[in-house]
Image (cartoon, rainbow, N blue to C red):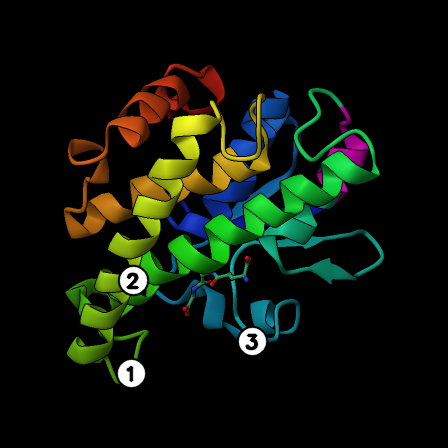
Amino acid sequence: MNLYYAPMAPNPDRVRFFLQEKGVWDEVPKTQLNIIKQDHKRPEYLALSPLNHVPALEFDDGTALTESRAICTYFESAYPEPNLMGVDAKERAFIEMWDRRVELTYLFQVAGWFRNAHPAMAELEKPQSKEWADICQGRAAEKIAFFDRRLGTSPFIAGDRFTIADITMHVALGFGRVMKYRPWEQFSNIAAYRERLLARPGLAT
Ligand SMILES: N[C@@H](CCC(=O)N[C@@H](CS)C(=O)NCC(=O)O)C(=O)O
């Protein structure tokens, strides 16, 4: 098995934090790629990840998972404790719902903003669109207000306990900082929640 990842990139970080929370990050064999240098576009990596996305988890039989959530699903079974994805059918489904809400409504908007506005992405996002960046920025601001309301009634995104949905939100909040977006300065529930996340050893670095 080999995990291909890139430091400081949000989707690889979802897997890294997941494994850090499980306490097994150091156990998993890894290869580090540099996205800015376009390591992920080399033919040998494309053979593994045809959409040239990072992360990828390659198995010894040559097959590979190339979706961060699918990689987490695999590791949830391989290392069941602590449980991060739900213990029964209903809890698993609710955690998935919240995780996908964070990913599809907030993380994606921050990503669209970054990819279309940040000079470091000029080589990878062609063409960059200032107009699209502005739309994504506005949608991110709308959606974080939704999650602030949620966190006013629930200590964690999916309910009473820390789950994969919080890892996705932690990554999204950190990613926004690249665009100097700090919603915790505006939203008190997000601020208190972020402090709870930052106190966790698995998310500290
Ligand atoms: N849906 C995929 C998305 C993966 C993805 O977009 N990864 C980014 C890094 S965060 C990437 O590989 N970007 C390379 C590029 O855009 O060329 C997942 O969840 O793993």
Residue 106 position (above or below residue 132): above
Q: Residues within 10 Å of mark 3 (few under 14, many from 20)?
A: few
Residue 101 position (above or below residue 171): below
Q: Position of residue 51 (x, y in %)?
A: 56, 74
Q: Residues within 10 Å of mark 2 (few under 14, many from 20)?
A: some
Please name the predominant secondary structure of the magenta segment in the image: helix
Q: Amino acid at mark 2?
A: Arg
Q: Identify the mark nearer the N-term, 3 or 2.
A: 3
Magenta part of the chain: 74-80
Dot 2 corresponds to which residue?
139
The CA distance from mark 3 to mark 1 is 20 Å
**Quarter occupied by residue 91:** top right
Residue 173 position (above or below residue 107): above
Query: Residue 15 in magenta?
Result: no
Q: Residue at x 69, y 52 (%)?
A: 70
Dot 3 corresponds to which residue?
43
Q: Residue at x 22, y 62 (%)?
A: 138
